[in-house]
Amino acid sequence: MSENTHLYVLWTNDNLITAEKMVFMYTVNSLVHGWWEEVTLIIWGATAKLVNENTDIQEQIKKAQDAGVHVTACKACADQLGITETLEKLNIEVKYWGVPLTEVLTNGEKLLTI
C-alpha cells in the first residue's frame, strides 16, 4: 500500500440511494477489506439536513462508525440549519471544515467528492 493511506469522503449529495449504495457501502468496505487504513466521512450541506431527519441514515452512520469510519460534519452548515446538537448526539464531530478541507486539497490527500 502506498504511504498515503487516508481517504477523505466529502459527502454533499442528499440522495438516499447514493448514500446507501455508494457512501456507506464504500467507506465501510474500505476499512473492512483494508483498501484504506483510515476513512473520514465529511458531512457537508444538504447531507447534514438528511442526517438530522432520517433515522435510517443515522443507523448507517452508527454502523460506519462501528466499522471505524471517522464521521465529521461542517459546523457552519450545522449551525445554519440549527442541528449541531443533534449531530453531536450522534457522535459526529462537528467542526469548521473550510481550512481543513483546503489543507486536504493543498497537501495532495486523497479526496472523493460525492
Image (cartoon, helix red, strand yellow):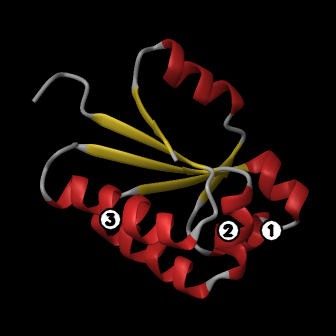
Question: Mark 3, mark 2: which one is toward the viewer?
Answer: 3
Q: Residue at x 40, y 23 (%)?
A: 109
Of the residues shown, which amino acid type is indicated by label 1?
A: Ile
* Horizontal arrangement in the rendering, residue 34 relative to residue 74 (left or right): left
Residue 71 horizontal/vertical position (percent):
50, 57
How crowded is the residue under tag 1: few (<14 C-alpha within 10 Å), some, or many (20+)? some
Residue 56 appears in the picture as rendered: yes
Q: Secondary structure at mark 2?
A: helix
Judging by the rendered image, the residue that carries numbered circle 1 is: 83
Q: Identify whether 19 is placed above or below 31.
A: below
The residue lying at 55 percent from left, 20 percent from top is: 103
Residue at 37% x, 75% y is 63
- Element at label 3: helix
- Amino acid at dot 3: Met
Q: Which residue is mark 3?
A: 25
Which quadrant, please, contains the N terminus?
top left
The answer to the question of whether label 2 and label 1 lie on touching residues, with beta carbons closer than 8 A, is yes
Query: Residue 29's quadrant in the figure?
Result: bottom left
In the image, residue 68 lies at what x, y percent?
Answer: 31, 60
Circle nearer the N terminus (3, 1): 3
Residue at figure coordinates x 29%, y 67% from the top left: 67
Is residue 18 shown left or right of residue 22?
right
- Give the structural element (helix, strand or loop) at label 1: loop
Alpha carbon distance from label 3 to label 2: 21 Å
Image position of 37 with respect to 61: above or below: above
Residue that carries the numbered disc 2 in the rendered image: 87
